[in-house]
Amino acid sequence: MREVTIGPNEGGQRFDKYLKKYLKEAGSGFLYKMLRKKNITLNGHKADGSEKLNAGDRVCFFLSEETIDKFRGTVSPVSTVPKAELLSIPVLYEDSQVLLADKPAGLLTQKAQAQDYSLNEWLTDYLLAGGKLKEEELSTFRPSVCNRLDRNTSGLVICGKTLAGSQKMSELIRDRNLHKFYRLFVAGKPPAEGLAESWLLREENSNQVRIYEKKPADSRAVPVRTGWRLLEAYEDCSCLEVELFTGKTHQIRAQMAALGFPLIGDARYGNEAVNRHFRKAGVRSQLLHAFRLEFPPLDGLFSSLSERSVVAPEPESFLRMRRFCESSANVRQS
């Protein structure tokens, strides 16, 4: 017999989902049969698998150690990068449930291929290295990012350290109760403030979207809304702060390009002649930064985030861009 106590990272999920993670090599039929026969119990009682687990619950497996080990399998390595070589990623906020990281441009939020090392892998390594997560917990729960940024977009990413944290942050994002603000440089000079309302359609078989002023016939199109205000205007470019009222793939990049103000450095939706000019400022990728998150009133486990505003300082590429624009203006005036 083996007894397991449910930890704080494992609470909040259905019992059967937990079992499928813990005994990952066992089939569903076997698990439900063991529940019916009381070979697997919850808090000393028969269970059917639909129960919601809480931290501190006791799960007893009345199975041989050989059977348990057989169905447990082995935990795959967390990453190929040693913990001593952790990326230096600023942590802007952290509590027992949630972590807010400042992702640098060039790093994937989630890996696209097996060999990739993304912010997701960094999060696990960071928690393990700090003793905030135990290796054995990874068989039933893995911390994860809750919002995705493009590889070449920098800034704030929300990470769930626990199942409860991941669920709550995903709920806030889904219900649009979390206010997200970005900073960016665009070509041209938009009005001092504005609201872009259009339709976005993701193209089949490509990682690209199209923007339509009116609803297209294709039922897959979704409405998107982006508000902006002008922060600084230079001779041939501007710095904006935008608020996402919806959050769809490439929304900011595609909408601003459709308005005639493409992001500087954007190879997909931008203007190549503009990008070529600003390479003199060291611009090698899109100047888009997830700058600020504003949280709604929250209580309980998340009370410390209630009505909190978290800011990720602008990256060095933004400072270089300003210096270049200011020096260019001085040269033209002299």
Image (cartoon, rainbow, N blue to C red):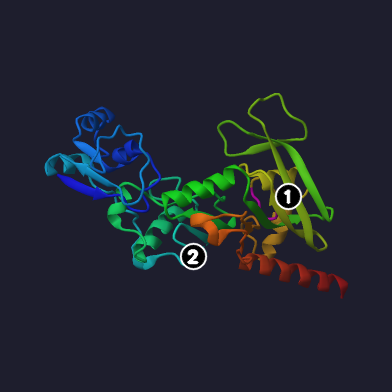
Q: Is residue 22 left or right of residue 206?
A: left
Determine the residue positioned at 32% across, 36% down: 16
Which residue occupies the foreground of this view, 92 or 45?
Answer: 45
Image spot of residue 238 (x, y percent): 77, 59
Residue at mark 1 = 262
> What kind of secondary structure does the magenta stretch mostly adopt?
loop
Tell me the SS state at disc 1.
Answer: loop
Number of marks in the image?
A: 2
Labelled disc at residue 89? 2
Other-residue count near label 1 (Cα within 10 Å), few / some / many at <14 / 14–19 / ≥20:
many
- Closer to the observer: label 1 or label 2? 2
Quadrant of res 294: bottom right
Quadrant of res 124: bottom left
Image spot of residue 158 (x, y percent): 53, 55
Which residue occupies the foreground of this view, 218 or 321?
Answer: 218
Q: Is residue 207 left or right of residue 163?
A: right
Image spot of residue 324 (x, y percent): 73, 69
Q: What distance separates the C-alpha of mark 1 from that of mark 2?
A: 29 Å
Other-residue count near label 2 (Cα within 10 Å), few / some / many at <14 / 14–19 / ≥20:
some
Image spot of residue 245 (x, y percent): 69, 46
Magenta residues span: 263-267
- Vertical placement of residue 200 versus 106, above or below: above
The amino acid type, in three-letter code, at marker 2 is Ile
Determine the residue positioned at 27% across, 43% down: 22
The amino acid type, in three-letter code, at marker 1 is Pro
Q: Is residue 187 left or right of residue 157?
A: right
